[in-house]
């Protein structure tokens, strides 16, 4: 077993691609918006300017030639589609959040999404009461890949960002978490490792929260990694 001792006191989750499988919905929404104005969006543009990026960035990058009123119509279409679509949860994520909360570990959500969607997702996962902090798109002027969202989450938790564990699925999200100083676990493939993720897992299947004999809490990843959350850091953060 490969142990990675991390002096952490809180765990932060991105939303799209980490809490819910939303890639197909998001891509469809932006392509529909592009079709409205005779545009096409390439796979490269999806990777660079859509996944893990706040909506205003995507509009600036792909729709900046449109009048402001049409840019607002694009944004309204994206919000409508994402707020009304059905999503599947990422396997195991509800169970992990519930177990972390039961162990006294504070949990947060840091996303480029907006509050209406966040509230809908947490209700769907039945984890509303487990969430200690939420950072949404309008809370920061610079979104991912800048560190600002994760720095703000840590500030609201009264913690240094270095004492947080982050789950992210996009390159921009991983870059944001790592730049803030967090220990980042990638949800997806090994392509997230060069961005700074310390390890990568496909989803949360088999991830367990374990109470250790020394009083600390451990997050066990299959097959060979453990992250230890220091009880002392948890208690100091809650004081």
Image: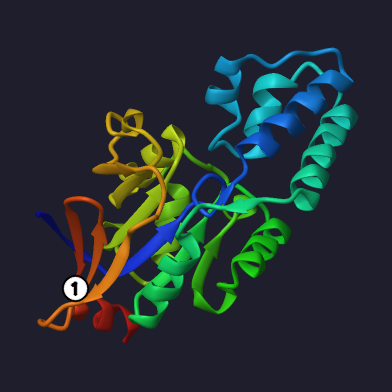
Q: Which residue does the image show at 42% across and 53% down from the upper left? A: 150
Which of the two residues, 64 or 113, is positioned nearer the viewer here? 113
What is the quadrant of the N terminus in the image? bottom left
Which of the two residues, 115 or 157, is positioned nearer the viewer here? 115
Secondary structure under the numbered disc 1 in the rendered image: loop
Q: Could one spot residue 121 in this view of the protein?
A: yes
Q: Is residue 98 left or right of residue 73?
A: left
Which of the two residues, 19 or 230, is positioned nearer the viewer here? 19
Q: Which residue does the image show at 29% across and 63% down from the upper left? A: 160
Q: How many marks?
A: 1
Q: Is residue 80 left or right of residue 88?
A: right
Q: Is residue 138 above or below residue 233?
A: above
Toward the bottom, the furthest residue is 239
Q: Which residue is mark 1?
A: 230
* Percent of width and height locating residue 204: 40, 55
* Percent of width and height locating residue 11: 37, 64
Q: Is residue 61 left or right of residue 209?
A: right
Q: Could one spot residue 157 in this view of the protein?
A: no
Q: Which residue does the image show at 57% across and 36% down from the upper left? A: 53
What is the quadrant of the C terminus in the image? bottom left
């Amino acid at each position: 077993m490969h142990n990675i001792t991390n002096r952490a006191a809180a765990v932060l989750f991105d939303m799209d691609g980490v809490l819910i499988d939303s890639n197909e919905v998001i891509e469809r929404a932006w392509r529909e918006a592009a079709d409205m104005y005779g545009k096409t969006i390439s796979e490269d543009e999806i990777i660079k300017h859509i996944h893990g990026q706040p909506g205003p960035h995507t509009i600036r990058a792909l729709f900046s030639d449109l009048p402001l009123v049409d840019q607002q119509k694009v944004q309204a279409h994206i919000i409508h589609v994402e707020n009304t679509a059905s999503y599947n949860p990422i396997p195991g994520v509800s169970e992990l959040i519930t177990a972390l909360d039961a162990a006294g570990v504070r949990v947060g959500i840091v996303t480029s999404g907006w509050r209406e969607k966040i509230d809908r997702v947490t209700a769907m996962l039945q984890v509303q009461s487990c969430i200690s902090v939420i950072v949404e798109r309008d809370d920061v002027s610079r979104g991912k890949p800048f560190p600002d969202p994760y720095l703000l989450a840590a500030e609201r938790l009264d913690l240094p960002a270095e004492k947080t564990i982050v789950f992210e699925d996009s390159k921009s999200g991983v870059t944001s978490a790592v730049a803030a100083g967090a220990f980042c676990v990638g949800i997806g493939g090994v392509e997230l490792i060069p961005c700074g993720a310390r390890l990568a897992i496909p989803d949360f299947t088999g991830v367990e929260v374990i109470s250790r004999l020394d009083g600390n809490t451990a997050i066990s990843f299959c097959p060979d990694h453990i992250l230890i959350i220091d009880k002392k850091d948890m208690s100091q953060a809650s004081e």
